[in-house]
Image: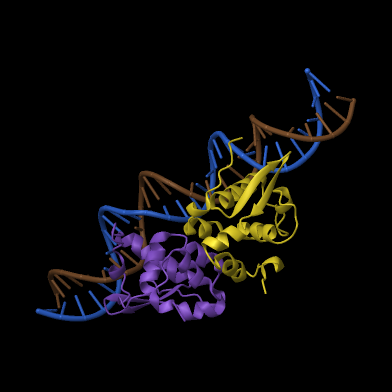
Chain colours: A yellow, B purple, C brown, D blue
Amino acid sequence: MRPLFHPALEDIKPEAILYALSDPERVAIYAKLAGAACGGTCSALADLGDRVIPKSSLSNHFKVLRESGLIRSERQGVEMRNQTRCAELDERFPGLIRAILTAYGQLPEQLKTG
Amino acid sequence: MRPLFHPALEDIKPEAILYALSDPERVAIYAKLAGAACGGTCSALADLGDRVIPKSSLSNHFKVLRESGLIRSERQGVEMRNQTRCAELDERFPGLIRAILTAYGQLPEQLKTG
DNA sequence: TCCGTAGTTCAGAAATTCGGAACTGTTGAT
DNA sequence: ATCAACAGTTCCGAATTTCTGAACTACGGA
């Protein structure tokens, strides 16, 4: 497996963020990740309720999220641990992620600051 | 020419907004529209400085912006008048447009409210 | 009516997306 | 050591989307 690429904070491009989050499936995945203590493995996030995302598509979604700078992925044994880069991102693009998740009606409790 | 379609405010989808603004050319066009009193005609917005957008591509950009709900277009004689739906949109998706334009470093003076 | 201008539509080439099948890397059991 | 099971990745072909030159439409003025 190729090493996973993660952009440095200063290399993150707004167009990549917007593109990644212009797909409702990816938003659903990202919101779950930002929210619950779901462990963050890929397969734990594949089930959208109305549909189960195929493995290869899912893998691609994670690649898009990762390479846009939205999440960080790390292999841990046999599975992949994914976490959002929320805090970092909010520093670089203040209010952006919050506004987007809110627009989708998917802002998780954890991010509803004061 | 087919009649121009504009979604009603309540039909505007966040994914369409994000998709439309995931293209830096469209962002440049939109930011100019939101900013200066440039008249809002298509051709007035075609020049990006480093490149002139071909007519057909430009027309398509406007279609994407219009059908996502970001702008309103209206024929006025031989030309097309375009204006943003900023205020409306901010009601539906508070802070979204502002955060996006800010992320791109393209928030026009007009929108820098107090 | 005929011309010029603003923008749209068409069409085909190029690029992107999707997802099944095959593959890789890791753990645990025999 | 070998094997099986499992999580996720890569490959590749089909389908969809994007891009843009060329042809076209719509309007206004002479």
Q: Quadrant of residue B74?
A: bottom left
Identify the image quadrant of the C terminus of chain A.
bottom right
Judge from the rendering whether residue D21 lies leftward or rightward of residue A110; answer left or right. Answer: left
Judge from the rendering whether residue B65 lies leftward or rightward of residue A50; answer left or right. Answer: left
What percent of the width, then of the height, locates residue C19?
A: 63, 46
Instruction: Please tell me whether residue C24 is drawn above or below residue A33 in the rendered image.
Output: above
Q: Quadrant of residue D19?
A: bottom left
Residue B109 or residue B88, whichever sits in front: B109
Residue B31 or residue A7, whichever sits in front: A7
Judge from the rendering whether residue A23 lies leftward or rightward of residue A42; answer left or right. Answer: left
What percent of the width, then of the height, locates residue A109?
A: 71, 68
User: In the image, what residue occupies the spot 47% across and 58% down?
Assistant: A15
Residue A68 or residue B86, whichever sits in front: A68
Q: How many badges with numbers are in the image?
A: 0
User: In the image, what residue occupies the spot 28% across and 70% down?
Assistant: B44
Q: Quadrant of residue B38?
A: bottom left
Identify the image quadrant of the N terminus of chain A.
top right
Instruction: Please tell me whether residue A77 is drawn above or below residue A98 in the rendered image.
Output: above
Instruction: Please tell me whether residue B91 is drawn above or below residue A94 in the rendered image.
Output: below
What percent of the width, then of the height, locates residue A96?
A: 54, 66
User: In the image, what residue occupies the spot 58% across and 38% down?
Assistant: A3
User: In the image, what residue occupies the spot 66% across and 71% down?
Assistant: A113
